[in-house]
Amino acid sequence: MAESRFRLPRFSLRLRLFISIAAIVALFTLTNITYQISSQNRNLRLDNLQKAVQGQLASVTTRQQMQDQQKEILVLDALKRGGQQKLSKKEISGALASLQNLANRVRSLGDYAYLDSIEAYKQLSTSYAELDMLWRQFYTGYNEDQTPLATSLERSFENTLALLGAFEAMEVQAAEQLTAQLHKVSRFNDRVTMGIYLFTIALTVGLGYLLIRYTTQSLTNLNVGTVRIGRGDLDYHIPVSGDDEIGDLTIAFNEMADKLRNAMAQVQQSKEKADQANRAKTNFLANMSHELRTPLNAIIGYSEMMIEVYNEENQLDEKQAVEDLEHILSSGRHLLQLINDVLDLAKIESGNMTVLNETFDSVAIIRGLATTMLPLARKNNNQLLV
């Protein structure tokens, strides 16, 4: 009793598959988490590297614009000393707008500053504010001869340019450090991911080998049995090799073969009944085609007689024409009734037919039949007496 009470559950195929799948899913999840973390770190460093590169490009562009602006001022100063014409209001407004754009570009360099380059950017911003003020004074006072001295402009420009160079050097250094860190992190993440990936492959192969080794014999027996059953040997029973899911599947196959054998016998009986029903339906359709032909011939016969009379006499007797039309109408109704009977047969086969008790006039039916048959009799020079 003690052994049965503490008996461990059987190590079935389902349990083996569950353990294998759980291990593979766990390793796959670990690989995915590692990849996500490494991808986030890589993206963060890539963003920082991109920011540093953009800062370098912005610094180079700003340096070029500052140099162009300083050259323009030096040229204007030389022209002023040579007694050339003054600047128009439009030219002064354009120059001030260019200075405003350049000031905005210098302020945008703050977006690319790092912790180590913030102080350098503050010094650059202060120096450029002084240079921008001198440049503005140069343009606003150009026509009134109140421009700052060229030496003070040159000194402020060189100081600002030197601070811009220092800021640019820090940006280059930051980009190099970020590049080195990115390479280092990428190599580490690749190694970790590859290690987990290889371990997952090894575990998958090992578990697959064990499962195949365990199930090969049982599946072989099952395969032999299914082939024999598939060939029509429904009396064959597959031997049950174990008390597990494959054994349950083997039992299910044996039961299926028994049920299939019984079902085949029932199908054979149903086939014989269906053949009988098809033969009866064929006979019915053959008879019905003859029945449908009779009212059609009546309709055609009366129509031809009316056409012949009209062609011969160029007119129709009104009374005779009405009688012929009534015969055509009666034959048409008879044809419609036959078609309804065919549809009723389909309802009977589908089980949707409702039977109603009705009274009818047998004399009217006989007269209708005589009316239907009369054109055929006249066509063959016969007489029909009722």
Image (cartoon, grey):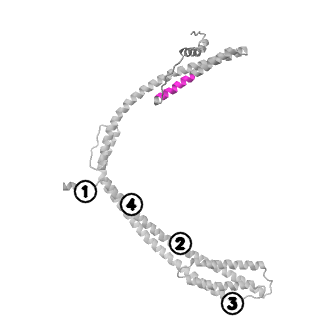
Picture layout, residue 67 above or below residue 339 = below
Mark 1 — residue? 8
Alpha carbon of mark 3 to alpha carbon of mark 1: how far?
A: 95 Å
Q: Which residues are magenta?
A: 335-348
Q: Residue at x 39, y 66 (%)?
A: 196
Q: Which image quadrant for residue 151? A: bottom right
- N-terminal of the two: label 2 or label 1? 1
Callout 1 environment at 10 Å: few (<14), some (14 to 19), or many (20+)? few
Queried whether the magenta region covers residue 354, the answer comes back as no
Q: Which image quadrant for residue 235? A: top left
Mark 2 — residue? 47
Q: Which mark is residue 152?
A: 3
Amino acid type at image mark 3: Ser
Q: Are marks 4 and 3 in contact (CB under 8 Å)?
A: no
Alpha carbon of mark 3 to alpha carbon of mark 2: how far?
A: 40 Å
Amino acid type at image mark 4: Val
Q: Position of residue 101 (x, y in %)?
A: 67, 77
- Nearest to viewer (mark 3 / mark 1): 1
Q: Are marks 4 and 1 in contact (CB under 8 Å)?
A: no
Q: Are marks 3 and 2 in contact (CB under 8 Å)?
A: no
Amino acid type at image mark 2: Asp
Mark 4 — residue? 25
Nearest the camera: 108 or 53?
A: 108
